[in-house]
Amino acid sequence: MSNGTKHVGNARHWPGMLLATAFFFAYVYLPIVILIALSFNENRTVTVWTSFSFDWYKMAFQNRDIINAAGNSLLIATVASTTATVIATLAAVRMSVDNFRGKTVFSGLIALPITVPEIVPAVATLMFFASLGVTLGLGTVIIAHIAFCIPFAYLPIRARLEGMDPRLVEAATDLYASPVKAFFKVTLPLLLPGILSGMVLAFIISLDDFVTTFFLGGAGSTTLPIYIFGLVKTGVTPEVNAISSLMLLLSISLVSLSLFLGRDQSRK
Amino acid sequence: MRDNTDNIAISVRGVSKIFDEGVNAFVALDNVSLDIGSNEFFTLLGPSGCGKTTLLRLIAGFEQPSQGQILLNGENLEQLPPFKRPVNTVFQNYALFPHMTIAQNIAFGLEMLGRPRQEINSTVDEMLELVQMKALADRRITQISGGQQQRVALARALAPKPKVLLLDEPLSALDLQLRKDMQIELKRLQLETGITFIFVTHDQEEALTMSDRIAVMQGGHILQIGSPRDIYEHPQHRFVAGFIGEINLLRATTGKATPEGLELRLGEMRGLEAKAKKQVSSGAKLTLAIRPERILLAGQDKEPLTGKLTNVVYHGTDTLYHFDLPDGQAMRARRQNSDKTGPEWKIGDTISWSAKPDSIAVLED
């Protein structure tokens, strides 16, 4: 080994590291920071700063359409994430307790939808509902959301299960717990952080979704992303900035919650 | 030694366990039979892969035998799932429930059995007392040390007062001093509770210290069952002799029968005698086993047998002498350091030695 390799592990010694880092963070976060700043701008013209105010937030909260859209978003996200989490939990537990032929393939198939371009299942589901003659609306959106939420809920639960000592369930049955009791007394409580983490993740994915909602929505199923898209077409007002900022705040809180719940508590 | 024929807790009858099928098939246990008495501290001893843990898991009900049956107090366990067997396990890594306190862990079995709250509370108290963990009852499992977790695992498994307690290498994760303390502790618990303990270990010292009887296992078979003294003093099998303690294994030929038993020859050298259990014809080849501490060493020409010192290793309480026999076989003898200086034998010196007839085991291969 030559002396030159001594500092390779320390990124501070790389030329231009600081600049590259600064550029990266500016590239990713500057637009968001500007958007949040402008949501407090008193001026109606989006790009010209005059003075600080909460006016646009007030306006957003008084706008019935926004309230309705937010209500739809929360309803869809709640129903979709809860249902998807129940299905994902059942799938994950089954995958962990049993060895069967083609298990790896099934495990892959459950997670696959994450990598499929969203437009594909969206169009496919649209055609499916069209061929059945189902009227598009909240119901069809929720059904489609459940489908794409399942893998997002499944992965954290599965990860949590992999980290769980199989002897714990054995210990429970050894101590006179029937398989059902062992599940509710030992498996479920230990899995709960993973389940909640998966549910929160699914909730955010559903809340932010545009493509699927756009294709499968109908009258009365306008969600916040769809509403904002409509507003932008007619010109961006600081009101859009205000709603976007609020959605960002909600997303960040939920992601933090998900990470907090999913952290490994068994390690000291 | 206790009488095991009247009061048998666990009876294993012709049990085999084969994992997987076809080319991957692995025979973990091959037609194993044994009886374990009530109140007995019984140890399954063997290297990893010998089938000792598999046998324990079959008794617990986590696995089903491929053949044969296991009886508990005369009752066939075959149809009983683990949660209906009056048998509890202390797991190797303890498998304590991390989302519960110490007291909740200990109460778990009793709660599952639907015992009244009052009884549960008093039993939990009793168990905490038994393993000296009363002060930590409301701590979480993650907040206590390995040795303390070990005690909780014991208390949890003992709380439902099982007929049989199964212990799967429970001391292997502890450091040496703690392990020695726990050996004494385990023996005390077994005597106090009067529960049959079946203890699995690969540690021969652990087996010798605690057990009433030991079954030495290898490759899915039981090679020998007996008391610690019996197994140590009278190994019937080359593997048993080598696995438990230090031993010299020597190739010998038989000479003529003597009043004491049987004359043995090491190469051309005569003068060794063993108690022969069965008739062996003169000139037969066999293997002898002699423990290093049973060899009596002396200066040149004082004893009938000779050897040439090749190494001397000082161990504090005793000294280990390595020497070669005239026919080239290597031997070791252990000598207690009963005075400060010891004999002044140097490497290369010729020494003489002997061994009592009852210190020599004639082995089957």
Image: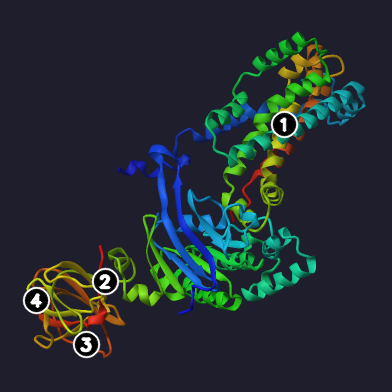
Q: Height in image: A130 above or below A158?
A: above
- How many labels sit on residues? 4
Given the image, on which type of amino acid does mark 1 rest?
Ala
State the residue position of label 1. Answer: A84
Q: Is residue A222 visible?
A: no
The span from disc 2 to disc 4 (Cα, nearest Å) is 20 Å
Locate residue B296: give its quadrant. Answer: bottom left
Tag in front: 4 or 1: 4
Locate residue B214: give its quadrant. Answer: bottom left
Q: How many other residues sit within 10 Å of disc 2, few (<14), some (14-19) or many (≥20)?
A: many
Which chain does the numbered disc 4 sit on? Answer: B
The span from disc 4 to disc 3 (Cα, nearest Å) is 27 Å
| Residue B199: mark | none
Given the image, on which type of amino acid does mark 4 rest?
Met
State the residue position of label 3. Answer: B342
Q: Are marks 2 and 1 in contact (CB under 8 Å)?
A: no
The span from disc 2 to disc 3 (Cα, nearest Å) is 23 Å
| Residue B269: mark | 4
**Residue A151, image x, y percentages:** 65, 30
Element type at marker 4?
Answer: strand
State the residue position of label 2. Answer: B247
Given the image, on which type of amino acid does mark 3 rest?
Gly
Locate residue A127: give its quadrant. Answer: top right
Q: Earlier in the sequence, mark 2 or mark 3?
A: 2
Q: Height in image: A94 above or below B84?
A: above
Which chain does the numbered disc 2 sit on? Answer: B
Element type at marker 1?
Answer: helix
